[in-house]
Image (spheres, rainbow, N blue to C red):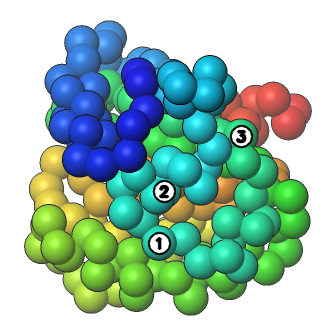
Amino acid sequence: VRFRAGKTEKMRLEELMKTEIATNSLARVAIKNSPENRWISLNELASAFKINVPLEISGKLESNFTLALFSQKEGIRIALVARATSSPDLVNLLKNWERDIITIGAKQFQPQTSFFKTAHYQGETFKYLTLGTNDFGIVYIVLDNYLILTSSYESMKVIADQIISIKK
């Protein structure tokens, strides 16, 4: 995918969401800044989609990241995985950012609640905000120095399982 500032990213993301991927599979998405012949950073990705990530959070994440699409029976979901350079207070910083995330999500979707809920998977705590039906929302977990941010519970589970299996 070529990266250009402006409206094109949203259109390209919508096109990507229509990609044919085998069910229960992940497909990595690499976004290149063609004029500079390099992969974009996490901050550039956030900026392109007009997501204001607080410096306290972005400063704790490496600029390299993995963006992926996950195909589940309810449709294509998006996932982002970034390694944390320092994770002890990342969870609290993310919690403080939740209200802004809800505002972003509410612009396009009607959240089922006005707050993130807490749940557990494989003994780890994760947070989620349901934005609609069919396993669609905002889900995040910090696991073994990785921030996993997805648009579904199912995609978070698959990625968390991969990280946990590497850890063993």
Pointers 2 and 1 in contact (CB under 8 A)?
yes
Determine crowd level at label 3: few under 14, some 14-19, many 20+ residues with C-alpha closer than 10 A: some
Question: What residue do we see at 35% from left, 86% from top?
Answer: 115
Determine if residue 148 is in view: no
Name the secondary structure under disc 3.
Answer: strand
Of 129 and 63, the residue lying toward us: 63
- Residue 125 in view: yes
Q: Residues within 10 Å of mark 2 (few under 14, many from 20)?
A: few
Q: Say above or below: 21 vs 94.
A: above
Sequence-wise, the earlier of marks 2 and 1 is: 2
Percent position of residue 139, x then y = 44, 60
Q: Which residue is mark 3?
A: 64
Q: Is residue 123 above or below residue 30?
A: below
Q: Amino acid at mark 3?
A: Asn
- What residue did someone put label 1 on? 52
**Residue indicated by mark 2:** 46
Secondary structure at badge 1 equals loop
> Where 83 sits versus 55, above or below?
above
Quarter occupied by the N terminus: top left
First in sequence: mark 3 vs mark 1: 1
Cα distance between the residues tagged 2 and 3? 13 Å
Q: Residue at x 14, y 67 (%)?
A: 109
Picture coordinates of residue 106, whole percent (x, y): 19, 75
Displayed quadrant of residue 21? top left
